[in-house]
């Protein structure tokens, strides 16, 4: 669907839940996604660095269907080929993934491309190459991504937001207690992992984060 036909993308991405498996609790990516969607989350990103491509694609298809039923966005982390194959709404890339320029050549018009920069110059280059939004962090300390690096804090987040390059989605250690602060720093939304995936009640946890973020300010712009 072309971007011009998508209503309120910034609102849809007010809270993005990034899935994570929890072997101890017997939870898979679909469990996390469905709990988030039931709570009212409108954007889900599937992320798994270890799952085989075939299994990953099958899970992606099922989550994509669940997201479509709820009118939510579905994004795939890293794997451009799987994102394209399952017809997700977008793909999220990092500095070690396929370059945004190459991803744009492979993907159809209107396909969302997010990018996680490790510096402001990287953010500028990614947006010039066609990134629609920036996933910036880790804002706070996080255990869900061991290689995430040192937290940049709200001041570091604000530095990216002040650049005005593209909508910024804050990520890293975000929960219901600190999510609102990321919006004050200038972010368009927040992405959560552990706050939902490792909660006793995932649906309730997702609802609490969503409520803490409040209603999106549509006057602030859109994707």
Image (spheres, grey):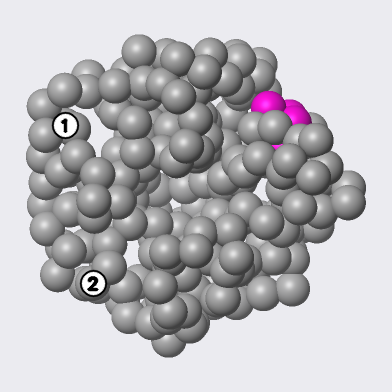
**159 versus 86 height, above or below:** below
| Residue 106 point in image, percent of width and height | 16, 23
Q: What element carries label 1?
A: helix
Tell me the distance, in whole angstroms, between the alpha carbons under discs 1 and 2: 21 Å
Q: Can residue 81 be seen in the rendering of this structure?
A: yes
Query: Residue 52 in magenta?
Result: no
Q: Can residue 15 be seen in the rendering of this structure?
A: no
Q: In this view, does 5 lie to the left or right of 36?
A: left
Q: Which residue is drawn at 34% across and 31% down?
A: 79
Viewer-nearest residue: 131 or 35? 35
- Residue furthest to the bottom in view is 155
| Residue 215 point in image, percent of width and height | 66, 55
Disc 1: which residue: 104
Is the magenta region chiefly helix, strand or loop? helix
Viewer-nearest residue: 177 or 19? 19
| Residue 206 point in image, percent of width and height | 76, 49
Q: Which of the numbered marks, if any, corresponds to residue 219?
A: none
Q: Which residue is drawn at 88% across and 47% down?
A: 201
Badge 2 local density, few (<14 within 10 Å), some, or many (20+)?
A: few
Quarter of the view holding residue 44: top right
Q: Which residue is drawn at 17% across and 53% down?
A: 126
| Residue 151 point in image, percent of width and height | 47, 79
Viewer-nearest residue: 195 or 164? 195
Q: In which quarter of the image is the C terminus?
A: top left
Q: Which of the numbered marks, if any, corresponds to residue 119?
A: 2
Quarter of the view holding residue 136: bottom left
Magenta span covers which residues? 30-34
Q: Is mark 2 on a helix, strand or loop?
A: loop
Quarter of the view holding residue 191: bottom right
Q: Quadrant of the N terminus?
A: top left
């Amino acid at each position: 669907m072309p971007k011009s036909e998508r209503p309120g993308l910034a609102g849809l991405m007010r809270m993005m839940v990034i899935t994570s498996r929890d072997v101890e609790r017997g939870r898979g990516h679909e469990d996390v996604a469905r709990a988030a969607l039931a709570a009212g989350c409108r954007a889900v990103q599937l992320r798994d660095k270890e799952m085989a491509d075939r299994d990953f694609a099958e899970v992606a298809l099922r989550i994509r269907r669940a997201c479509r039923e709820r009118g939510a966005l579905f994004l795939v982390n890293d794997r451009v080929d799987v994102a394209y194959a399952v017809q997700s709404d977008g793909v999220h890339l990092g500095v070690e993934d396929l370059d945004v320029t190459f991803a744009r050549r492979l993907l159809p018009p209107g396909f969302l491309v997010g990018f996680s920069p490790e510096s402001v110059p990287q953010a500028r280059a990614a947006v010039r190459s066609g990134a629609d939004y920036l996933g910036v962090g880790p804002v706070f300390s996080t255990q869900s991504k061991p290689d995430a690096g040192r937290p940049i804090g709200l001041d570091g987040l604000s530095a990216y937001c002040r650049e005005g390059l593209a909508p910024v989605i804050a990520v890293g250690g975000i929960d219901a207690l600190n999510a609102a602060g990321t919006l004050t720093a200038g972010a368009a939304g927040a992405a959560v992992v552990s706050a939902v995936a490792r909660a006793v009640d995932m649906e309730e946890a997702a609802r609490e984060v969503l409520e803490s973020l409040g209603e999106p300010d549509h006057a602030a712009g859109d994707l």
